[in-house]
Amino acid sequence: MILCVGTTGSGKTLLLRALAENANPGSVNKHTTAVSTTGANITNITRINPKKPELADSVRVREIGGTMSPLWGNFVEAGRTQVIYVVDVSAPEKIGPATIDLIELLNQPALQGAPFLIVFSKTDIKSSRTLNELKQLMRLDEIKEHSTQELHSLDFNTEETSKIEPILNWCLKFKNINYEMMNGTTY
Ligand SMILES: Nc1nc2c(ncn2[C@@H]2O[C@H](COP(=O)(O)OP(=O)(O)OP(=O)(O)O)[C@@H](O)[C@H]2O)c(=O)[nH]1
Ligand SMILES: [Mg+2]
């Protein structure tokens, strides 16, 4: 299953809502508020093919609230977990802890070789640092160079619907893998 993690308030819940609601054209919705996630929360993301509705693409994403960061590792299964890591670009003061948490995840033995997507969220908010400056502060290039994972990064905000599609496509790449897992195991 895809795991969605990141610091408290980084925008995970709104990102997943946007993905779930915009998986099909015509259901665009903007969001400005959400309550903090306690524990874990699963979102189904389904994209229906209008020509073949019976062949809908579907993946499940499990958000773990930022307050649970010490326990993120408990939700990881070797060879079966993909990670969306959300980083709030409007809060440069949180970039240090966000980077440390990311490095800890990348070092998890069960996540070696796992696909990772870093989502830089809230890019509609004016910040004291540019996105590039934040990536440099995180030393993202160095992190990518030294990790065993395939690390992609994209940016997102709730105001621009064009930002949704690339993230949706990344998630749906894992639909078959996760479907087979769900059939074969205890999901
Ligand atoms: N302007 C703007 N605000 C956003 C955006 N995404 C999230 N927010 C704001 O950030 C707040 C927190 O977002 P959530 O999606 O609840 O954050 P979360 O990562 O799920 O937080 P936890 O569940 O506590 O870990 C929301 O109430 C919004 O006000 C965005 O793209 N743009
Ligand atoms: Mg949440």
Image: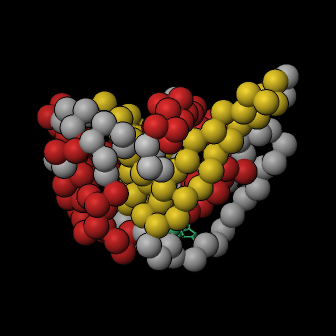
Which corner quadrant of the image does residue 56 belong to? top right
Number of callouts: 0
Q: Position of residue 121 (x, y in %)?
A: 49, 54
* Horizontal side, residue 46 vs residue 176: left or right: right
Q: Position of residue 69 (x, y in %)?
A: 30, 67
Quadrant for the N terminus, please: top left
Q: Position of residue 13 (x, y in %)?
A: 55, 62
Which of the two residues, 178 or 82, is positioned nearer the viewer here? 178
| Residue found at x 50% / y 73% | 37
Q: Position of residue 72 (x, y in %)?
A: 31, 61
Question: Can residue 59 be seen by looking at this rendering?
Answer: yes
Q: Of all residues shown, which one is farthest toward the top?
A: 51
Where 16 falls versus 38 (above or below)? Answer: above
Which of the two residues, 43 or 156, is positioned nearer the viewer here? 43
Question: Can residue 99 be seen by looking at this rendering?
Answer: no
Which corner quadrant of the image does residue 139 belong to? top left
| Residue found at x 64% / y 57% | 17
| Residue found at x 47% / y 60% | 63
| Residue found at x 19% / y 49% | 108
Q: Give the colour scheme shown.
A: secondary structure
